Image: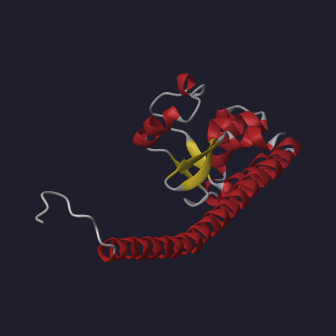
C-alpha cells in the first residue's frame, strides 16, 4: 500500500488530521457499513479524541476537498465518522483481520510521515526567517553605508562648485 494513496485520504477537520470511514473501509477492503457496525459495537475504545462524527456543516464544507463517491450511498442523516491517528490504530483491534493490521500499520506510517514533513517544514521556515533577519540587517547596513558615501560625495561636489570661480554671465561693466 502506497503512502501517497493514504496521504490523499487524510483531511483536516476541526484542526486535526483525520481519515473518514468510507476511505478507511476502502483501504481495509470492507464495506463502510461493516466498519461502522464494528465501531459501534466497540464504541468504548473510541473516545472523542479518537473518533467523531462530522456535522452537516463540516460534511458540506469539506465536500470540495473530499472525493464524494460515498455521498451518493449515504443520506444526509448518515454523516461520516472521522478517525484521528489514534482512532485508526484502534480500528485494527476492532476489525481483527490480517489485512486490517497491515493497513493500520501503513496508515500510522503515513500519519508519522505527515508529522515529520510538518516538523521539517517548520524548521525550514524558522531557518529561512532567521536568514532573512540576518541578511536584511546586513543589507540595511550596506545601504546606510552607500547612502552616507553618496551624501558625502554630493557634499564634496557642491563644495568644489562653490570654491571654483565661475565666469559671470550677463552684461559686463568695464
Is the residue 37 above or below the residue 42 in the image?
above
Q: Is residue 17 left or right of residue 78?
A: right
Is the residue 114 above or below the residue 144 in the image?
above
Quadrant the N terminus occupies? top right
What coloring was used for the rendering?
secondary structure
Residue 78 visible in rendering: no
- The image quadrant that residue 148 belongs to is bottom left
Q: Nearer the viewer, residue 149 or 43?
A: 149
> What residue is shown at x 48% (from left), y 27% (from top)?
75
> What residue is shown at x 29% (from left), y 74% (from top)?
162
Q: Residue furthest front?
A: 174
Q: Nearer the viewer, residue 105 or 113?
A: 113
Is the residue 6 above or below the residue 134 in the image?
above
Q: Nearer the viewer, residue 171 or 72?
A: 171
Q: Is residue 117 left or right of residue 3?
A: left
> What residue is shown at x 73% (from left), y 50% (from top)?
91
Residue 16 visible in rendering: yes
- Where is residue 62? Give x, y as percent: 49, 38
- Where is residue 126? Give x, y as percent: 61, 68
- Where is residue 40? Give x, y as percent: 61, 47
Q: Nearer the viewer, residue 19 or 100?
A: 19
Amino acid at each position: 500500500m502506497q503512502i501517497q494513496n493514504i496521504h490523499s485520504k487524510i483531511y483536516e477537520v476541526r484542526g486535526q488530521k483525520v481519515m473518514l470511514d468510507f476511505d478507511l473501509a476502502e483501504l481495509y477492503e470492507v464495506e463502510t457499513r461493516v466498519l461502522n457496525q464494528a465501531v459501534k459495537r466497540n464504541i468504548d475504545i473510541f473516545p472523542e479524541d479518537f473518533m467523531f462524527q462530522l456535522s452537516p456543516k463540516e460534511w458540506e464544507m469539506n465536500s470540495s476537498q473530499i472525493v464524494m463517491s460515498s455521498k451518493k450511498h449515504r443520506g444526509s442523516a448518515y454523516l461520516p465518522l472521522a478517525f484521528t491517528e489514534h482512532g485508526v490504530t484502534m480500528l485494527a483491534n476492532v476489525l481483527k483481520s490480517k489485512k486490517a493490521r497491515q493497513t493500520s500499520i501503513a496508515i500510522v506510517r503515513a500519519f508519522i510521515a505527515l508529522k515529520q514533513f510538518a516538523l521539517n517544514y517548520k524548521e525550514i521556515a524558522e531557518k529561512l526567517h532567521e536568514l532573512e533577519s540576518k541578511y536584511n540587517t546586513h543589507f540595511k547596513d550596506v545601504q546606510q553605508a552607500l547612502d552616507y558615501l553618496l551624501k558625502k560625495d554630493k557634499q564634496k561636489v557642491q563644495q568644489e562648485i562653490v570654491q571654483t570661480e565661475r565666469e559671470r554671465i550677463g552684461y559686463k561693466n568695464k
